[in-house]
Image (cartoon, rainbow, N blue to C red):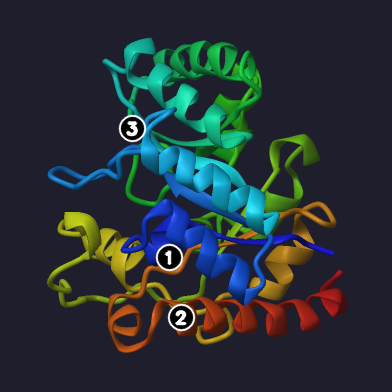
Amino acid sequence: MNPIGIAHLTLLKLSPPKLVEVAAEVGYHFVGVRVRAVTAGEEQYPMAAGSPMSLQTVRRLRDTGLRVRDIEFLTLGPETGPGDWRAMLDDGAALGATSLSCVGADPDRQRLTDTLAALTEDAMAVGIRPTLEPISYQPVSTVAGAAEIAAPAGAALLLDALHIHRGGSSLDDVRALDPDLVPCLQICDAPLAAPEHIELPPNLPMGMKADGSVLQVEARAHRLVAGEGELPLAELIAAVPEGVPLSVEVPHAVLQNELSSLEFARRNLDGLRRVLATADSHV
């Protein structure tokens, strides 16, 4: 059985303790928590280790039996160093997190590998393993390219259904990975072809920005619920190691405004369960 969790980006408008409450009520097994703002001008939840909100989140986790699997999100650029990640690692350790999501934004592959290796050394000391996510509009955009950086750095990969497809990677690329590199798979759906244009939704949660290329708008504000698009999700799940945790990452600005948080979380869980019911036939 694949444990199923919900990424914070799916319901970023919820504070971490509230996200835990909603996830537990719907039936998820774990959550992801954004402890560091990602886009310019984005508000940040006060999740420093020992803060009232962090302690409240820990209590909710204890009361519900859920856990925080991953914290996010660190961009690894040319100037990124220990000062950018040490507080994040403390914040994640306080929540019991076991992974830290990263993106490779440094075009110098060797420098990026060295930075990720330094991060991994610090992170593993507190029980956290960095996961490098290939993102279709970043310098590290393919599964194979991300693996070439993560493996020698001692990190893992964070595979995302949308970015695998939009970045030009294949299911064979996923199947070729060392199983140790695949501790989690993020699930969403989308049309097979990238949209030529998407209207930028107003009033995104926490002041998050989604402007830029159409790929950025789609990834941050217009993903589809599993089973409501055209991605080969059952085949993708069958291509990763059996029982890998699945994290629902479905920021969909329209649905998030039309449905309550409980309704949206439940729709995502139900959609993924329907996909899983068909996944065995693709093994």
Q: Nearer the viewer, mark 1 or mark 3?
A: 1
Q: Is residue 261 left or right of residue 66?
A: left
Q: Is residue 84 left or right of residue 122?
A: left
Instruction: Provide residue 226's location: percent of width, then percent of height.
Output: 56, 78
Task: Mark 1 or mark 3: name the one nearer the start of the chain.
Answer: 1
Label drawn at residue 246:
none
Whether 113 is drawn above or below 173: the answer is: above
Q: Which residue is at a point 34% across and 78% down the rendered structure image?
A: 256
Q: Which residue is at a point 70% across and 85% down the rendered structure image?
A: 274
Residue type beneath disc 2: Phe
Mark 1 element type: helix
Instruction: Provide residue 128's location: percent of width, then percent of height.
Output: 61, 27
Q: How many neighbours does mark 2 have within 10 angstroms: few (below 14), some (14-19), or many (20 or more)?
A: many
Q: Nearer the viewer, residue 132 or 260?
A: 260
Residue linked to disc 2: 264
Mark 2 touches mark 3? (CB < 8 Å): no
Task: Using the numbered discs, state the Cα–Cα distance from disc 1 to disc 3 in whole angstroms.
Answer: 23 Å
Task: Using the numbered discs, state the Cα–Cα distance from disc 1 to disc 2 in whole angstroms.
Answer: 9 Å
Mark 2 element type: helix
Q: How many neighbours does mark 3 have within 10 angstroms: few (below 14), some (14-19), or many (20 or more)?
A: many
Residue type beneath disc 3: Ala
Mark 1 touches mark 2? (CB < 8 Å): yes
Instruction: Tell me if I can see residue 171 in this picture.
Output: yes
